[in-house]
């Protein structure tokens, strides 16, 4: 029976790149892997065909020969995918390790001799604008898994030690032969740890870790912004059975300030001023975030929304000696609860006012009407 075309077996075009070949192989191998299709002879045969095709096409020289001569390139001992010698099982094991990791082998990363790296932790810390301006030190309490002191993280009762697993000999993995394929799996006896605990520690029940609350000191540098992440190396969960600890990531959130709004290193503050003050001009005093005072001069006829910049009075810029600016926005306040005499004076002022007194409002509605009428015509 003629062999199927290797490109058709993997479902790729003859111009497929190495990455496309690998992706197609990964998808098909996971679909037809014997572990996922126990007792299915058809799936096992497809799995073999997929491996044979990928072994050929993933090798540049073999692929070139196949593209030129087809399957004939490897007949009569041609050393192609049909010639599967002793090194084939080893090479396929490397491919499976690279492609499937934990699925076929349990993964080796961070599990040497059963020691696993601890998980990373996240802590959300809320700080004030003043904390971010000056920099500060915060004390936080973090509940996490810590190495058991009673057994020093081994999981075994004091005076005893974990024993090497008799099934895998301490490797944490066992190799199973399926036809001409050698496939490694996590050891079912020790679950990949390579050790067995016959006398577990009473404090941690063999886990090697216990849950405790720790107090940590966190340095907050001046100039940090909302969402800044601070990493404390090794302050996450303790590793399993003596493995390295994970990291603790602290995410900063800024509390709302009653007077200042922040945009990067700049600050904004709305200051109410009286109508008379805005009309006649003058000055007023504001307090800055560092606690000092600054005078702001306003010209005659200041309109609501007008901004005045106080250079260098904003937030410090992280890891520099520079500062942002503080912007003061005038909010002209309309008077309320007027007396009879005040009403009379305002009415008199309105009667005597001219186009120069109110240049923006004078004729505004007339101009608006003319514009809209012209746009519709």
Image: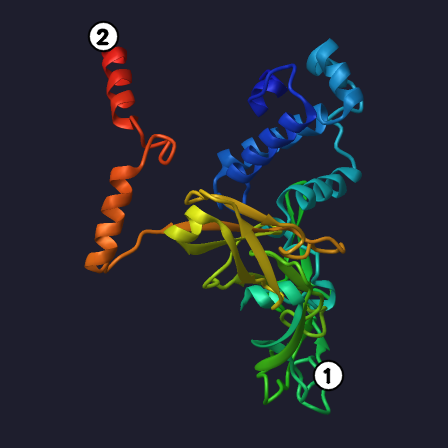
Residue shown at 69%/43% (left/top)?
98
Looking at the rendered image, the disc whose residue lies closer to the viewer, 1 or 2, is 2
Where 251 sits versus 343, above or below?
A: below
Along the line of sight, which residue is nearer the eye, 64 or 231? Answer: 231
Along the line of sight, which residue is nearer the eye, 86 or 301? Answer: 301
**Label 1 to label 2: alpha-carbon separation:** 95 Å
Residue 322, how many percent across, how many down? 73, 53
Total marks drawn? 2
Residue sitting at the far bottom? 159
**Residue at the disc numbered 2:** 377
Q: Is residue 63 left or right of residue 45?
A: right
Q: Secondary structure at mark 2?
A: loop
Where 169 sits versus 345, above or below?
A: below
Residue shown at 30%/55% (left/top)?
335
Residue 260, how many percent across, how many down? 51, 58
**Residue at the disc numbered 1:** 161
Please say if the residues under marks 1 and 2 sit with CB atoms less than 8 Å apart: no
Along the line of sight, which residue is nearer the eye, 373 or 364? Answer: 364
Q: Earlier in the sequence, mark 1 or mark 2?
A: 1
Q: Secondary structure at mark 1?
A: loop
Residue 270, how many percent across, how many down? 46, 54
Q: Is residue 93 left or right of residue 298?
A: right
Residue 198, how many percent across, how many down? 64, 83
| Quadrant of the rendered image containing residue 196 | bottom right
């Amino acid at each position: 029976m003629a062999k199927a075309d290797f490109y058709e077996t993997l479902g790729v075009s003859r111009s497929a790149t190495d990455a496309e070949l690998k992706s197609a192989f990964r998808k098909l191998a996971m679909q037809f892997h014997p572990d996922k299709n126990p007792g299915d002879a058809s799936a096992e045969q497809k799995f073999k065909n997929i491996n044979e095709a990928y072994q050929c096409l993933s090798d540049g020289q073999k692929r070139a020969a196949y593209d030129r001569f087809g399957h004939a390139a490897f007949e009569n001992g041609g050393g192609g995918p049909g010639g599967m010698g002793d090194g084939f099982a080893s090479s396929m094991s490397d491919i499976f390790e690279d492609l499937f990791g934990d699925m076929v082998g349990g993964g080796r990363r961070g599990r040497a001799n059963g020691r696993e790296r601890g998980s990373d932790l996240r802590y959300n810390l809320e700080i004030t604008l003043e904390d971010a301006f000056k920099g500060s030190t915060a004390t936080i309490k973090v509940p996490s898994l810590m190495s058991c002191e009673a057994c020093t993280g081994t999981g075994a009762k004091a005076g005893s030690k974990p024993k090497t697993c008799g099934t895998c000999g301490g490797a944490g993995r066992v190799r199973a032969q399926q036809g001409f394929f050698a496939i490694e799996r996590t050891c079912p006896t020790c679950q990949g740890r390579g050790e067995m605990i016959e006398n577990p520690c009473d404090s941690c029940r063999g886990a090697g870790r216990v849950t405790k609350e720790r107090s940590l000191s966190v340095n907050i540098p001046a100039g940090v912004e909302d969402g800044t992440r601070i990493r404390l190396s090794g302050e996450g969960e303790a590793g399993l059975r003596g493995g390295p600890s994970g990291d603790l990531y602290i995410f900063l959130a800024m509390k709302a300030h009653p007077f200042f709004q922040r945009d990067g290193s700049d600050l904004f503050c709305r200051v109410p001023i009286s109508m008379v003050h805005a009309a006649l001009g003058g000055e007023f005093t504001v307090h800055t975030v560092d606690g000092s005072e600054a005078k702001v001069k306003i010209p005659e006829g200041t309109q609501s929304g007008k901004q005045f910049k106080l250079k260098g009075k904003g937030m410090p810029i992280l890891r520099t000696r520079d500062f942002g600016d503080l912007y003061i926005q005038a909010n002209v306040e309309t008077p309320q609860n007027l007396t009879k005499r005040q009403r009379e004076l305002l009415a008199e002022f309105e009667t005597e006012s001219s186009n120069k007194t109110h240049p923006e409002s004078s004729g505004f509605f007339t101009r608006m009407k003319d514009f809209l009428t012209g746009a519709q015509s």
